Every structure is written in structure tokens, then in C-alpha cells.
Image (cartoon, grey):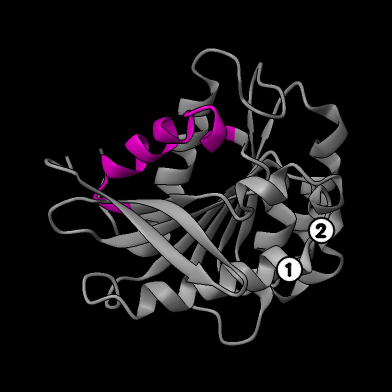
């Protein structure tokens, strides 16, 4: 069990903007899981806390934020942009490695919805620090050929009712050079809004990170 969780509001400077984030750390974190949400998504409605709580159970710290600022989320042109938020995510990695309480921690990446393609590109960038990845309900097709360049072990989590993206995620998993798998959360749609489904996705993520980062179980 994680015990006490220290939660701190932080501001992360990136090119042209400042991102508001919530840093949550157990007493002795095994790793830092960076969340990457696109247009508000589960962070915007508060459900990212459910995912974070599952990860905290195995001693994982979390950094929860939106890749886009509030103003950018209101702009239609940002809906399917990939490269700018991917570069921004790289800046967040760099920020984490410069913090005294974070720089020794392995970094993992968890992305949901519209942030998935940008996160996939960031995890494929040369020299990135990502050690393990989980994508929840995204459409990796917007990331082009990036899946084939990701070297971190990667888990694709999809909803059983989201027929439109199951094949897309399975195809992306098959293109990976690293260890990769797809898991289906039964009776879930794309945003895992059904009762208990987001928690189920969180447990899959927790187990995947535990396998590849050496964190303990709940």
C-alpha cells in the first residue's frame, strides 16, 4: 500500500505557456507516471483522480495535467494537432528530470483520449526518458508511423463497446518494436464512463507499470 500521498499543485513552464499540474507522491515513489490528456477529458471532469488512486496503491507517483491550456482547448484547430503537444510533452519530461524530488525516478506515460497520438509521438522521440507506456481509449492512427519507433513496453487499453478503435489499437500494438499488448475493458465505451470501467483500466495500467518498473502490487 502507498500510505500517505503528498499532493502539490505545480506550474510547469513550457514554450509559450504554463501548464497547471497536480503532483502526487507516495512516501517512497517507485516511479513517476506522467499523465497526458488532450482537451480536458478525464482531467476536466475529475475522473483522472480515479486512475491516479489505482497507481498510488502500488507506490507510483503521478503528474496530472492537460497538454493544452484552457484557451487552446477552446480552439477547434487544436482538436487533432499532434506534433505541438508532443513537443510540449517532451518539455514536461525535461522539467521532471530537473526537479530534486523527481530526477531519480523512472518515468512512465499514461494517456487517455485525444492526448494519445501526441503521447505516442513523444514516446517515439529520440532520447526520451519513458520506460513504460499505457494508452487508454485513443486513436493512434493520428500519430502516423510513430508506433513503430516506440521502444518502451506499451499497453493499449480499449473499451469493449468502442468497436471503431479496437482494430486501430490492435494494429498499432502489432507494429511496436517493444513488448506490446492490447487489453479490452468489457462494457466500456471510449471514455470509460460506465461504472467501474475507469477503475478497471487503472488496474490494468497499474499492473503493466508494476511489471516493467518493478513497483509493488496493491
Asked whether 71 or 193 is in front, the reply is: 71
Residue 11 visible (yes or no): yes
- Which disc is residue 81 wearing? 2
Q: Name the spot of residue 67 as percent of width and height, x first.
A: 60, 55
Position of residue 75 measured from the top left corner of the image (x, y, whole percent)? 80, 46
Q: Secondary structure at mark 2?
A: loop
Residue 45 part of the magenta segment: yes
Corner quadrant of residue 112: top right
Quarter residue 148 falls in: bottom right
Residue 183, x across and y down, in percent: 62, 39
- Check residue 84 in the rendering and tell me which mark sits there, or answer none: 1
Q: Which quadrant, please, contains the C terminus?
A: top left
Considering the numbered disc 1 on the image, is that residue within a helix, a strand or a loop?
Answer: helix
Q: Which residues are magenta?
A: 42-61
In three-dimensional space, the C-alpha distance between marks 2 and 1, rounded to whole angstroms, equals: 7 Å
In the rendered view, tell whether residue 207 sits above or below residue 146: above
Q: Residue at x 69, y 38 (%)?
A: 137
Amino acid at each position: 500500500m502507498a500510505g500517505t500521498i503528498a499532493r502539490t499543485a505545480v506550474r510547469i513552464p513550457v514554450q509559450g505557456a504554463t501548464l497547471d499540474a497536480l503532483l502526487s507522491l507516495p512516501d517512497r515513489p517507485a516511479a513517476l507516471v506522467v499523465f497526458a490528456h488532450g482537451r480536458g477529458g478525464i482531467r476536466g471532469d475529475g475522473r483522472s483522480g480515479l486512475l491516479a488512486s489505482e497507481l498510488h496503491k502500488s507506490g507510483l507517483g503521478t503528474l496530472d495535467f492537460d497538454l493544452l491550456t484552457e484557451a487552446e482547448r477552446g480552439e477547434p484547430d487544436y482538436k487533432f494537432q499532434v506534433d505541438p503537444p508532443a513537443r510540449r510533452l517532451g518539455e514536461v519530461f525535461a522539467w521532471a528530470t530537473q526537479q530534486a524530488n523527481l530526477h531519480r525516478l523512472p518515468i512512465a506515460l499514461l494517456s487517455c483520449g485525444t492526448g494519445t497520438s501526441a503521447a505516442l509521438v513523444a514516446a517515439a522521440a529520440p532520447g526520451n526518458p519513458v520506460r513504460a507506456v499505457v494508452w487508454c481509449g485513443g486513436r493512434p492512427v493520428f500519430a502516423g508511423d510513430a508506433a513503430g519507433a516506440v521502444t518502451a513496453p506499451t499497453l493499449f487499453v480499449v473499451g469493449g463497446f468502442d468497436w471503431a478503435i479496437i482494430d486501430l489499437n490492435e494494429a498499432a500494438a502489432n507494429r511496436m518494436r517493444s513488448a506490446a499488448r492490447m487489453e479490452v475493458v468489457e462494457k466500456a465505451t471510449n471514455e470509460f464512463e460506465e461504472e467501474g470501467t475507469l477503475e478497471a483500466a487503472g488496474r490494468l495500467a497499474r499492473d503493466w507499470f508494476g511489471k516493467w518498473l518493478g513497483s509493488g502490487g496493491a
